[in-house]
Image (tube, grey):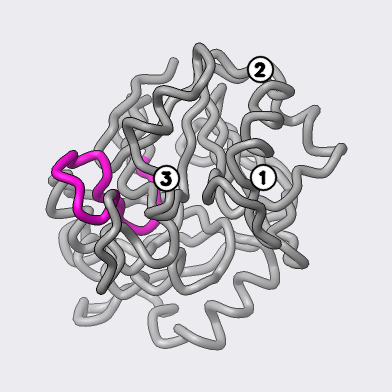
Amino acid sequence: MQLTMLGVGSSAGTPVVGCGCATCNSDNPRNVRSRCSSLITLDSGESILIDTGPDLRNQSLRENIKRVDAVLYTHTHADHLHGIDDLRAFCQIQRKQIPLYAKEDAIEHIKHKFGYVLREPSDFWDLPVLRTETIHVPFEIFGIKVTPIPVLHGRSHIFGYRIGNFAYMTDVSEIPESSFSLLEGLDVVLLDCLRETAHPTHINIEQSLAYIGRIKAKQSYMIHMTHELEYASLSSKLPKGVFVGFDGLKLHIS
């Protein structure tokens, strides 16, 4: 399968509106970070989207995405959910309903805030045509196993995901001890790394590297970064096998 990092930025994105820092003014395109999301394209052709951030339309145009067959939601903060309306384009192209997979509380939030998109297919495709699937345990989609990874985001209990030998964990403040057994034998992990200093709801560089050292994936990529982290500077500080993610990066994962 192929993984495409659609966005690796934090809730403000980079450049930050009105900011004149070195990262925001950088001419390195790897310092341009849209809101956090990734796309998994299976060898069978289906595409699984992780989160629908507010930059989904531009990310889709940039990467020439033509289909989305399912969405996995980590949680329902605005920078991970509020691009849900942009799924309309894929419903129109494919003329089919798209399933959304998430924890029960996330599903209830989507129903409350975006209930108009939850509807059955008809002759009208002027709105997204979506359905919800509440998940708690590993499940199979398009012939591949998806395992929810419970993590903490401050006081919130949210999900990361393992798909094959790839794992995705954004907006992490703590990985519970019970989740580490779900992270064994990974080829690739994408992990939250907000900034250099501590934060109450996200891990920082030091904490991210500590978790990466324990998970021991063959390759580890830092995501969900603020403008406080400059690509080249951070890259130069990382140990072997650890990389800074960037928008548009594509990885082939067996």
Q: Residue at x 49, y 61 (%)?
A: 100
| Image coordinates for residue 239, horizontal then vertical, percent | 53, 16
| Image coordinates for residue 3, horizontal then vertical, percent | 36, 32
Q: In the image shown, does 171 or 17 lie closer to the viewer?
A: 17
| Secondary element at tag 3 | loop
Instruction: Count the numbered circles shown.
Output: 3
Is residue 87 among the parts visible in the rendering? no
- Check disc 1 and report the residue beneath it: 148
Q: Does the magenta stretch include residue 35?
A: yes
Q: Distance between the residues labelled 3 and 2?
A: 23 Å
- Check disc 2 and report the residue beneath it: 216
| Secondary element at tag 1 | strand
- Check disc 3 and report the residue beneath it: 229
Q: In the image shown, does 252 or 193 lie closer to the viewer?
A: 193
Q: Would you say the magenta stretch is mainly helix, strand or loop?
A: loop
| Secondary element at tag 2 | loop
Q: Which residue is at the far front?
A: 21
Give the magenta-colored segment's residue range.
23-39
Horizontal placement of 56 versus 184: left or right? left
Q: Dividing the picture into quarters, in which one does residue 226 lie?
A: bottom left
Q: Dividing the picture into quarters, in which one does residue 55 lie?
A: bottom left
